[in-house]
Amino acid sequence: MKRPALWLLGVPLLVVVMAAPLARAMIAAHATPRLQVPQGWPAPRYDFAGNPVTAAGFALGRRLFYDPILSRDGSVACGSCHQQFAAFAHLDHRVSHGIGGVNGKRNTPGLFNLAWQPDLMWDGSVHHLEMQPVAPMSNPVEMGGSLALAVDKLRRDARYPELFARAFGSPGVDSQRLLRALAQFTGTLVSADSRYDRYVQGREAFTPQEHEGLDLFRQHCAACHREPLFSDFSYRNNGLDAAPRDAGRAVISGRAEDQGRFRVPSLRNVALTAPYMHDGRYETLEQVLDHYAAGIQPSPTLDPLLAHGVPLTAGEREALLAFLDTLSDENFIHDRRFAETHD
Amino acid sequence: MKRKMNLAARRLAAAWLLLLAGCGHGAAQGGLPLRIEISHVVGDAPLQLGDSYKTAAGDVWSAERLRYYLSNFRLRRADGSWFVNPQSADSSRGYFLVDEADAASKQFQIGPLPAGTYSGIEFLVGVDATRNGAGAQTGTLDPARGMFWTWNTGYIFFQFEGHSPQSSDAEHALTWHVGGGTGAPARSVFLQFQSPVEISAENSAELHLHADLARLFDGAHVLHPATQPTAMDAAASAEVADNSAGLFRIDHVHKLPKAGLAAGL
């Protein structure tokens, strides 16, 4: 009677001892983000089935994102323009500021929920998340190099060949692995934990002013900035210029009716991603609301929804601004897994 | 450890698939690969990079660079059915990048083909839409090879760069890049064999294709360097794309014994 009982006591002990490495592996796995589809969201467009996220693959992607080795002269990293505290936009930079201090012509957007975007960039010029890094890497005013150059530098680096082998299970550094590792990082940047999200899930209450702001938003803005991603991913002209200097979507589609149209940007984290619009012309959300209230410029491609602007009373303005503040995801911008200096 | 086992398991599965595919398509039915060799010509003379040539309208041109993709090969059987050359999502098998400056790129094999009688061959000049939008690729489709547009992502299907005194561009450059986009698929080419081609367990064939660059200017469309010195997007290069598909003809086909294939003759 006694002996079997004693023996049995040893079993859980043995299990614990044996399970320790397993538990450690599970914690490590937990530190690697997975693409979880938040409740009520559509299915993602980027399919991780062809590029399964692993701890080593994600860590490699993060390291590459913050490493200026991807630029021609080793001076600019993805993370130089995409800063986590600004939800991966470029704080205070009207347009991008790249290699040799040269300015580009478009504003750096925040990076989050990219796996849901059908196309990328303000004009939708990039059709696949994995192919996006080829654009900044070979842009003379961003990173100034080329994909071939970056692969060559990584192959000759002391650390990277081993990190690539660990991430992909066999030796070899090539552009496909580079692009897939970066996609494991950029594709898992999910921002879905703002006060707005917690309100929608019934986990947190809104103030009456925030409530009013949400109602106004749904009335005037949500047709384009559609919930839950706060964009319908269409290309539209929101009346910035009567004669647009940047043709926008028309460059890609070749169609006159796309002159001055740009992708409707997500408004998640919008209070953190100033300045605003494709050319970063507005520094504050107040200026953006001024634009929608009284600054709409008529043109042949102006979206009909904005033909009469969105005039608001002073109180409504405050309410709308209070609501836009609820879209900031503090947990996302402080998530250590996405940080340059991580755990 | 776990990952290693997964990998081993995946490799085993892949090996099985290959074996099965091999059985179904070629080996069991005694087929052999078909060899294709491409020569770039102007009229009847071999193209020389840097040499000057004249169009029917009297425009003068020279080529410095000529690169293009060929893919999605199919062979038509005498009974009207098709043999579809296998392509794999995991590699660039079946996608060929032809480069005038690289002799090895102008000779390649497709198949193995099941034994049978074939009456013609079809292929795309470029990359099919599915693969064009499929994300990071390797091998001939590696975007680091420079046959890739970053300003509107997708492959450059056909790239011709040269000079013409008639070109109004800086340094009289002539730059024609064809690529895909919505409503601009890769052009398809079908070439009928003059006489049926037999593939058996003992004998394959070598197909000599000529791509006549004179037809790039005097093709379905007549193109003038003066009015069209550059074509760098799908809309502007539509006529170049049409003409690129009209370059190809079968110069001759000859029998290739199995031993010759193995020896790489």
Image (cartoon, coloured by chain):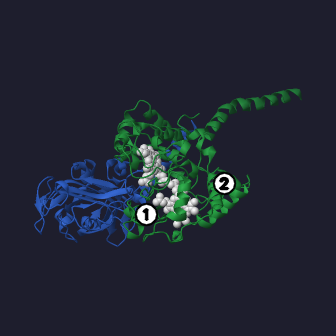
Task: Kindly indicate the quadrant of the structure image that contains residue A121.
Answer: bottom left
For this orientation, the residue located farthest to the right is A1
Dot 2: element: helix
Query: Measured along the vertical axis of the image, is residue A56 above or below residue B231?
Result: above
Q: Amino acid at mark 1?
A: Asp
Residue at (48, 56) in percent of width and height:
A277
Callout 2: few (<14), some (14-19), or many (20+) C-alpha neighbours within 10 Å? many
A52 relative position to B52: left or right: right
The chain letter under disc 1 is: A
Sooner in the amino-acid sequence: mark 1 or mark 2: 2
Chain coloured blue in this rendering = B
From the image, state whether disc 1 or disc 2 is nearer to you: 1
Residue at (12, 69) in percent of width and height:
B57
What label sits on residue A281 in the rendered view?
none
Task: Please name the color used to draw chain A.
Answer: green
Q: Amino acid at mark 2?
A: Tyr
Callout 1: few (<14), some (14-19), or many (20+) C-alpha neighbours within 10 Å? some
Q: Which residue is mark 1?
A: A241
* Image quadrant in which the N terminus of chain B is located: top right
Dot 1: element: loop
Q: CA distance from mark 1 to mark 2?
A: 32 Å
Q: Which residue is mark 2?
A: A196
| Foreground of the two, A76 or A130 | A76
Q: How many marks?
A: 2
Is residue A281 visible from the viewing direction of this image? yes
| Foreground of the two, B175 or A287 | A287
Percent of width and height locating residue A105: 39, 52
Residue at (64, 37) in percent of width and height:
A27
